Amino acid sequence: MKAFNLFSNFMTKYMSALVLIIAIVALLQPWTFEWAAKYVTYLLGIVMFGMGMTLRWEDFSLVFKRPRDVFIGSVAHFTIMPALAWGLAKAFGLPPELAAGVILVGTCPSGTSSNVMTFLAKGDVALSVAIGITTTVLAPFITPLLTWYLVGAWVSVSLGAMFLSIFQVVVVPIALGIIINRFFGNFVKRAVKVLPLVSVIAIMLIVGAVVGISAQKILQTGLLIIGIVIIHNICGYTLGFCAAKLAGFNFSKQKAVMFEVGMQNSGLATSLALMHFTPAAAIPGAIFSVWHNISGSLLANRFAAKAENDAKAAVLHAKKKAIHA
């Protein structure tokens, strides 16, 4: 068991690097992960089910205890990222399938790892969880509507089909996870140790599958899409932080909103792209999956280091004050 825990911790800690390695392998040797393409929807369902198993009914009460904070964070998420995605697709004159993929990333709910990054950055984790839950619950309604409205200029979108897809892939697995947590708590306490490893493996396979089946297209447009994904993500962090600051949030809340806005559920974007568009439309989601974990980790570590330095400076200042007194 100790060996398993060490392995699980290693996989979780170095997930960004491992996902990047998988992406490179799939790009150079597409056949290694092409087989996983038909399982992408199921893999995402597993990740969502695991997320549900970590939630309790009490977590939803946070939404009602802090309505203003959650409302502002959720509105910022569903306005900033879709608007940025649409603007980038227009500015760079992307072909229809890639434009659809970039916009899909922008219209999806918060990423599953945003809570972890907020925790590492010493931000307001409770607010992060509440915004993540809210955007995920709203996703079946808002994501199809925004995608239909913004992508309509490039390709046709079926509102009903996309709503059903999100309901099946996100809502049902999360609801099942919550129910199991509620009625089989002891089992969940044991299973929760395995969940991070299962989620990491599922995400790695999703990225590998999308990169594998789209390898040729990535080689043709890879640098452009990578650049757009990086701009999208960094601008999301920046504008999310600014929106929270304008709302009068304290620094801890600002960090939470920043991660909830900038980090997307790119696995869902990838799955929806494969179901409703073309494999090429899944490329932005796959690249975002790799990049936002890297950028999020770097940003969280920087904020954590700043918090430590501030704490040390405060202690030193207090000691000096005491000596002079």
Image (cartoon, grey):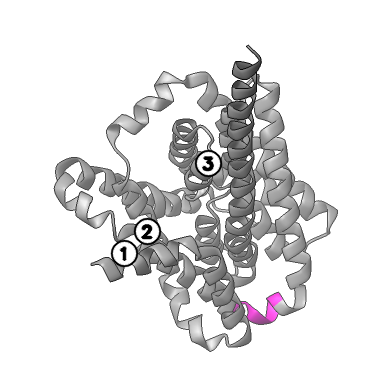
Residue 226 in the image: state x and y as whole percent.
Answer: 72, 64
Q: Give the number of the disc on residue 196.
A: 2
- In this rendered view, identify the residue nearer to me: 143 or 189: 189
Q: Which residue is mark 1?
A: 5
Give the amino acid type for the residue marked by disc 3 in the picture: Thr
Please identify the quadrant where the N terminus is shown: bottom left
Main SS of the magenta part reads helix
Which residue lies at the image location 43% right of the left edge and 67% below the top edge? 11
Please report contact status of discs 1 and 3: CB closer than 8 Å, yes or no: no
Give the amino acid type for the residue marked by disc 2 in the picture: Pro
Query: Magenta includes 143?
Result: no
In this picture, is 211 found above or below 155? below
> Depth-wise, is mark 1 or mark 2 nearer the camera?
1
User: Which element carries disc 1, helix, strand or loop?
Assistant: helix
Please report contact status of discs 2 and 3: CB closer than 8 Å, yes or no: no
Q: Which residue is mark 3?
A: 118
User: Which element carries disc 3, helix, strand or loop?
Assistant: helix
Find the residue positioned furthest to the top: 325
Label 2, label 3: how far apart the Cα atoms are: 17 Å
- In this rendered view, identify the residue nearer to me: 149 or 139: 139
- In this rendered view, identify the residue nearer to me: 244 or 217: 244
Q: Which residues are magenta?
A: 213-218
